[in-house]
Image: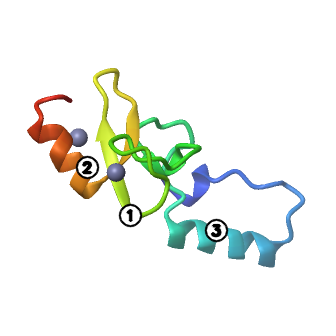
Amino acid sequence: MTRADVRLPPDLAAPQRERVLRLVAECGLAVRRHDPHVPGLLPVKRCHGCQQTGGRMGGHHLPDETVVWIHKSCHRKLHRAGRT
Ligand SMILES: [Zn+2]
Ligand SMILES: [Zn+2]
């Protein structure tokens, strides 16, 4: 995604505009908002394996292409169990 793809309010002052663009560049807002493959955009961060909400998690793809949060260890367990 390039800077040109970021839509900002037309009446935004130049200094603010510059700051927003820089923020976008820094925190990688380059991901598309509706991309279901980006786990960070899922509303609730709950582990698909143990249903806990805390801890560091990564994404796991379900057969229907959606991505769910899952702990690294739960993810391993899940795949070892042969389920997807
Ligand atoms: Zn878990
Ligand atoms: Zn997985």
Look at label 3 and name its amino acid.
Answer: Leu
Query: Residue 55: x percent and y percent?
Result: 42, 64
Q: Is residue 45 or residue 11 the one in the foreground?
A: 45
Query: Residue 41: x percent and y percent?
Result: 53, 47
Query: Residue 27: x percent and y percent?
Result: 52, 69
From the image, state whether disc 1 or disc 3 is nearer to you: 1
> Residue beneath label 3, please?
21
Check disc 2 and report its element: helix, strand or loop. Answer: helix
* Structure colour scheme: rainbow
Q: Is 84 on the left-hand or right-hand side of 11?
A: left
Check disc 3 and report its element: helix, strand or loop. Answer: helix
Q: Is 30 on the left-hand or right-hand side of 78?
A: right
**Disc 3 to disc 2, how far (Cα)?**
37 Å
Q: Does the residue labelled 2 lie within 8 Å of ligand 1?
A: yes
Check disc 1 and report its element: helix, strand or loop. Answer: loop
**Disc 2 to disc 1, how far (Cα)?**
11 Å
Look at label 1 and name its amino acid.
Answer: Arg
> Residue beneath label 1, please?
56
Q: In which quarter of the image is residue 12?
A: bottom right
The residue most toward the right is: 11
Q: Is residue 63 or residue 79 the one in the foreground?
A: 79
Disc 1 residue crowd, few under 14, some 14–19, many 20+, Cα 10 Å: few
Please determine whether, in this image, residue 65 is positioned above or below residue 38: above
- Residue 74: which numbered mark, if any? 2
From the image, state whether disc 3 or disc 2 is nearer to you: 2
Q: Does the residue labelled 1 lie within 8 Å of ligand 1?
A: no
Please determine whether, in this image, residue 36 is positioned above or below residue 22: above
Q: Is 52 on the left-hand or right-hand side of 5?
A: left
